[in-house]
């Protein structure tokens, strides 16, 4: 049979004809017949373009349906007394947001607690007649939270004068229900920088509306439901800790549900569950709009996100299992002025409220709540995820391990059989295919990271994409894709060259042009199969370390492997390769994209939003670090998700268009950043800054020196502050010349000014550290009296290189921190204290010196104690500066950062 090459794609019947010729007995006759055969292995560039469009739009569609599709808000007349109404819940959000920022110790917080108490009393009056509702205004005198994990390593969190609102709903005629309770918890307090519409007035509002609905259902319950509206969460989870350690109802709790916000609005998703799988399995059975991803739990528990919620207290201190929900949309506004009511999306409260109401009705009627402090083995851990926000899948780690092991063994069997049948050429081809993977990762990360460094040079802000996340796709996604294709194509060329030599040796009877064509087709297939190897390795690692997110590796391995095996694979060593079918990639990617694309997009947006607060110690890390992390993440997504699709490009005409398109997109985005076309911050997405009036008395000894006073401005967002300082125009100087140690919060880069800094404070406001008694000898002990004067929020760092142990008491001799082993970080143990307006301001600290202490030889400037006290007061120079603060900036609050007026003091080792 004679065929003509016309530049069209290679057809299967062409390959079959060639194979028949190869297997014929007359080699000379076959060679003569095929002398003029000219076959071209080429895929249409339109096919590749269509595949890319389908993947991109399909992924965005999954994200939109899974995370942006919210239920319609319902009014009270639509849901009745027993349903959840967002309209009613929004009334609570509005009332709390109108109070403005209400941090611990403020008058606004007192008003917020009063409002919640009154709302709870109304629920009590309107409850079903067979339901008993109790409202307890719980006051905490003092306590100490000494956890050692995560963010709490090296810290003791002390609290005083906190008020919580506790509401318990029980069936009136089921007395044993009081002994088994489900806790629903959130916090009323906010940081000093924002009104907290999202974090967490929205959660409080949902709880109040849930309590109203539950109070109409509870006559059929077998368990009680406790709603805890706590204060002190923003200062270190103090509200939750005080409740579980001091409230009499805490012993009855069997399940804990925490409602949180790391943004404002959107779908409230479960990002932590367990350890007992009972709660997540029951939630999955009844949730109307399930939103839960164990991927988020894996990331959060790894420590990659420097944050903590009350759920950590319930799990570690109280030994409870349960669920942890969080809003994460608009995560860039977290703890800033833009955590405001206007950004709360309609349907957000309805989504969480309906899910929670369905869960509480099921859980409260259940006769089998999990036992308190019943820690499950790792094999019983729940693996969970939702599909398009409509259906939820849960299964145990034990089943997951069996499933993964089965897939791993089957994969090893198939690969071993295939390689044994293919011989040494198959083994070398697989190795070269894996080389293409390595090159793909190297080039993708290198190209993307290079842009991360360039941004710090050409942009006024190292994070120009915060307000417009799509810009990050252009800045990092384009070079990542270009690098991935470049690296994989380099590996493809090496592999093709090897296969061409192999075909030349083993298929000498075939025409040269046909051997070249077959080498290209076979190389394409090995590149595709190398993608399977990549996910196979990830599945084995995930299975070995019991990582919950390993189900994604299973999906990305099994689905493409099934499609390839069903449509492409053959065990016949004599059959020549054919082009990969378009149906193979469509079928192979459908399930993985359905399960992961929406989650990846949301996670990417969250990472970009956290750039606002990426810097924990200003000036301590380079400006490019956050960009490098984002660049590597996006490169990893490209290499993992597009490895199969990229294998379709090498024999297509889309190579040049892909290079041109990605390069053009990158250049245009860099030009837009360089020219300031896209502003990095807006009115709604502001840069996080701290402006503090500092009174530094650390070098004042015996009243010989005056304290140093200045205004300090620093940022939690990467980049310098020159533009902001020029905008304010009060004579700020910027640089690293004035290092400030705020005890647990050090500032290496800042802007500062001295103008008017001597006003707005008194010397009597400065805290004092007085040595009352010092007993020197073999076991040295020192008694120190600390007076924080007007401050009820302070941090004290203790030098653990000198001090082995310590004890803290208040002025009434009530023990706040007992003797015992203390952890440390970088040689310091930090006490963080926060309290209400009636909290004590005088304390007694008993220090026990270490046997390895260097106090006898210590230099005069080495410090034993460092103290910072905070006052939420605006001095005259602060009022001026905040009035001139650019609109694209916002004060940023967290538990370790100072308020607007901070006093620094210290005690040297050689006092």
Image (cartoon, rainbow, N blue to C red):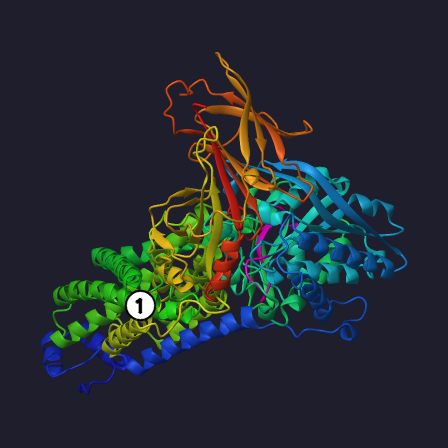
Residue 81 drawn above or below residue 270: below
The answer to whether residue 300 is seen in the rendering is: yes
Is residue 638 toward the left or the right of residue 366 in the image?
Answer: left
Foreground pick, 706 / 318: 706
Residue 818, position as x, y percentages in the image: 61, 27
- Give, as a single range, the part of the protein colored magenta: 261-278
Mark 1 = which residue? Answer: 481
Label 1: few (<14), some (14–19) or many (≥20) C-alpha neighbours in 10 Å: many
What's the residue at 40%, 18% (across, down)?
A: 856
Residue 511 belongs to the span the image colors magenta = no
Residue 593, position as x, y percentages in the image: 45, 68
The answer to whether residue 511 is seen in the rendering is: no
Is residue 591 toward the left or the right of residue 464 in the image?
Answer: right
Badge 1 marks a residue whose secondary structure is helix
Residue 604, position as x, y percentages in the image: 44, 63
Quadrant of the rendering where the N terminus is positioned: bottom left
């Amino acid at each position: 049979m004679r065929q003509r090459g016309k530049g069209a794609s290679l057809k299967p019947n062409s390959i079959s004809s060639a194979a028949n010729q190869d297997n014929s007995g007359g080699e000379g006759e076959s060679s003569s017949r095929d002398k003029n055969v000219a076959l071209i292995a080429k895929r249409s560039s339109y096919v590749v373009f269509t595949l890319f469009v389908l993947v991109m739009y399909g992924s965005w569609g999954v994200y939109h349906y899974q995370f942006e599709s919210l239920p319609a808000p319902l009014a009270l007349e639509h849901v009745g007394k027993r349903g959840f109404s967002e309209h009613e819940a929004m009334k609570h959000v509005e009332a709390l947001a109108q109070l403005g920022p209400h941090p611990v110790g403020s008058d606004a917080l007192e008003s917020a607690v009063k409002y919640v108490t009154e709302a709870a009393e109304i629920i009590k009056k309107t409850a079903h007649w067979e339901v008993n509702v109790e409202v307890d205004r719980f006051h905490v005198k003092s306590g100490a939270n000494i956890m050692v994990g995560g963010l709490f390593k090296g810290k003791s969190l002390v609290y005083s004068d906190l008020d919580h609102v506790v509401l318990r709903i029980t069936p009136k005629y089921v007395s044993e229900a009081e002994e088994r309770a489900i806790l629903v918890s959130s916090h009323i307090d906010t940081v000093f920088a924002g009104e907290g519409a999202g974090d967490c007035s929205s959660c409080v509002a949902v709880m109040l509306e849930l309590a109203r609905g539950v109070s109409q259902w509870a006559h059929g319950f077998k368990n009680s439901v406790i709603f805890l509206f706590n204060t002190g969460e923003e200062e270190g989870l103090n509200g939750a800790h005080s409740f579980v350690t001091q409230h009499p109802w805490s012993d009855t709790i069997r399940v804990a549900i925490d409602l949180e916000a790391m943004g404002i609005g959107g779908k409230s998703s479960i990002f932590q569950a367990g350890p007992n799988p009972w709660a997540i399995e029951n939630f999955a059975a009844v949730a109307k709009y399930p939103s839960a991803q164990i991927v988020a739990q894996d990331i959060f528990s790894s420590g990659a996100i420097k944050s903590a919620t009350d759920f950590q207290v319930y799990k570690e201190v109280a030994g409870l299992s349960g669920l942890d929900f969080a809003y994460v949309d608009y995560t860039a506004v977290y703890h800033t002025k833009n955590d405001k009511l206007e950004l709360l999306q309609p349907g957000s409260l309805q989504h969480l409220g309906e899910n929670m109401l369905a869960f509480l009705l099921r859980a409260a009627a259940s006769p089998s709540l999990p036992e308190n402090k019943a820690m499950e083995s790792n094999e019983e851990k729940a693996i969970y995820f939702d599909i398009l926000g409509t259906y939820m899948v849960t299964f145990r780690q034990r089943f997951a391990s069996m499933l993964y092991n089965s897939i791993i063994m089957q994969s090893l069997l198939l690969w071993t059989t295939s390689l044994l049948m293919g011989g040494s050429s198959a083994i070398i081809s697989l190795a070269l295919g894996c080389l293409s993977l390595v090159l793909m990762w190297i080039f993708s990360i290198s190209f993307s990271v290079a842009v991360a460094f360039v941004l710090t040079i050409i942009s006024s802000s190292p994070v120009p994409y915060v307000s417009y996340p799509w810009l990050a796709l252009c800045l990092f996604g384009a070079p990542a894709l270009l690098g991935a294709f470049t690296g994989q194509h380099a590996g493809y060329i090496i592999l093709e060259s090897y296969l061409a030599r192999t075909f030349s040796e083993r298929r000498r009877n075939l025409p040269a042009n046909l051997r070249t064509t077959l080498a290209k087709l076979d190389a394409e297939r090995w590149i595709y199969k190398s993608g399977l190897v990549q996910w196979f390795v990830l599945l084995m690692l995930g299975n070995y370390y019991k990582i919950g997110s390993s189900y994604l590796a299973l999906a990305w391995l099994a689905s493409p492997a099934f499609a390839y095996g069903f449509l492409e694979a053959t065990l016949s060593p004599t059959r020549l390769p054919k082009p990969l079918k378009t149906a193979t990639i469509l079928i192979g990617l459908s399930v993985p994209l359905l399960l992961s694309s929406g989650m990846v997009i949301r996670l990417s947006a969250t990472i970009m939003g956290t750039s606002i607060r990426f810097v924990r110690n200003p000036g301590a890390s380079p400006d490019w670090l956050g960009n490098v992390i984002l660049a590597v993440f996006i490169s990893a997504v490209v290499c993992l998700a597009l490895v199969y699709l990229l294998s379709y490009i090498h024999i297509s005409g889309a190579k040049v268009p892909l290079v041109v398109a990605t390069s053009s997109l990158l250049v245009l985005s860099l030009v837009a950043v360089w020219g300031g076309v896209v502003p990095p911050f807006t009115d709604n997405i502001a840069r996080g800054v701290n402006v503090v009036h500092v009174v530094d008395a650390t070098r004042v000894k015996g009243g010989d020196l005056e304290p140093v006073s200045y205004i300090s401005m620093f940022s939690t967002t990467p980049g310098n502050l020159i533009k902001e300082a020029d905008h304010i125009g009060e004579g700020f100087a910027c640089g690293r010349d004035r290092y400030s140690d705020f005890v647990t919060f050090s500032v290496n880069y800042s802007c500062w000014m001295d103008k008017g800094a001597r006003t707005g404070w008194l010397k009597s406001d400065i805290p004092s550290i007085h040595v009352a008694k010092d007993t020197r000898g073999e076991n040295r002990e020192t008694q120190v009296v600390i007076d924080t004067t007007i401050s009820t929020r302070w941090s004290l760092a203790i030098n653990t290189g000198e001090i082995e142990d310590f004890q803290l008491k208040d002025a009434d001799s009530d023990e706040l921190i007992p003797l015992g082993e203390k952890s440390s970080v970088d040689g310091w143990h930090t006490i963080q204290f926060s309290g209400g307006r009636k909290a004590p301001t005088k304390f007694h600290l008993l220090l026990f010196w270490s046997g390895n202490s260097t106090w006898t030889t210590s230099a005069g400037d080495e410090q034993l104690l460092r103290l910072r006290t905070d006052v939420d007061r605006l001095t005259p120079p602060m009022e001026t500066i905040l009035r001139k603060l650019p609109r694209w900036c916002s004060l940023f609050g967290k538990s370790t950062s100072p308020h607007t007026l901070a006093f620094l003091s210290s005690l040297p080792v050689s006092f």
